[in-house]
Amino acid sequence: MTTLRTATGLAIAPDGTTREFDFTPGDALAAFQQHVGGFIEPVDLSDQITLYADEEGLLKYRGPAFLNRAAINLIIRSYGESTPIMGPVIAVGGLNRDGDNIGLTREQITYLTRTVAEATGQVR
């Protein structure tokens, strides 16, 4: 019998609030969709970190309160530019050999949390 291990991701709300969540690699689609509120669209920040946003976020979420400045900041750090990201996003680890996302390391969570706080003016 194979034991399914859980992995950790980071949910990032438009207001910059972050929250860790658990998921099971290989069986994560429903959990990812629940966290972003719809169909997921990946944005690889690196080989080790993937953001998922709602692929229909621009259509569903209206107004500056839904603009996810933290996600935009993370994408700009990786690519130098970004399109608007509306609504919540999640960050998870890169892909394993089976093509499934893995969890974030503690160091990655610390980096993401710090970067989100800087982007939203919540640095302590």
Image: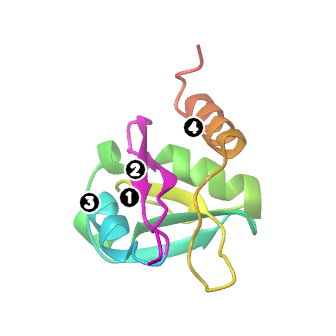
Disc 4 target residue: 116
Q: CA distance from mark 4 to mark 3?
A: 20 Å
Q: Residue 99 sits in which quadrant?
A: bottom right
Q: Nearer the viewer, residue 51 or 21?
A: 21
Q: CA distance from mark 1 to mark 3?
A: 6 Å
- The crowd level at tag 4 (other Cα within 10 Å; few <14, some 14-19, many 20+) is many
Task: Tell me which segment is drawn in magenta.
Answer: 1-25
At label 2, the amino acid type is Leu
Identify the element where label 4 is drawn: helix
Q: Nearer the viewer, residue 69 or 20?
A: 20
Q: Quadrant of the N terminus?
A: bottom left
- The crowd level at tag 3 (other Cα within 10 Å; few <14, some 14-19, many 20+) is some
Residue drawn at x 69%, y 83% as measured from the top left: 97
Q: CA distance from mark 1 to mark 4?
A: 15 Å
Q: CA distance from mark 4 to mark 2?
A: 13 Å
Residue drawn at x 37%, y 66% as measured from the top left: 32
Q: Can residue 27 be spotted in the picture?
A: yes
At label 3, the amino acid type is Tyr
Residue drawn at x 57%, y 37% as measured from the top left: 116
Cβ–Cβ under 8 Å for marks 1 and 3: yes
Identify the element where label 3 is drawn: loop
Disc 3 target residue: 61
Magenta stretch contains residue 23 = yes
Give residue 29's position: percent from left, percent from top: 37, 76
Please tell me the numbered disc located at residue 67: 2
Q: Residue 17 sits in which quadrant?
A: top left
Please tell me the numbered disc located at residue 86: 1
In front: mark 1 or mark 4? 4
Q: CA distance from mark 2 to mark 1?
A: 5 Å
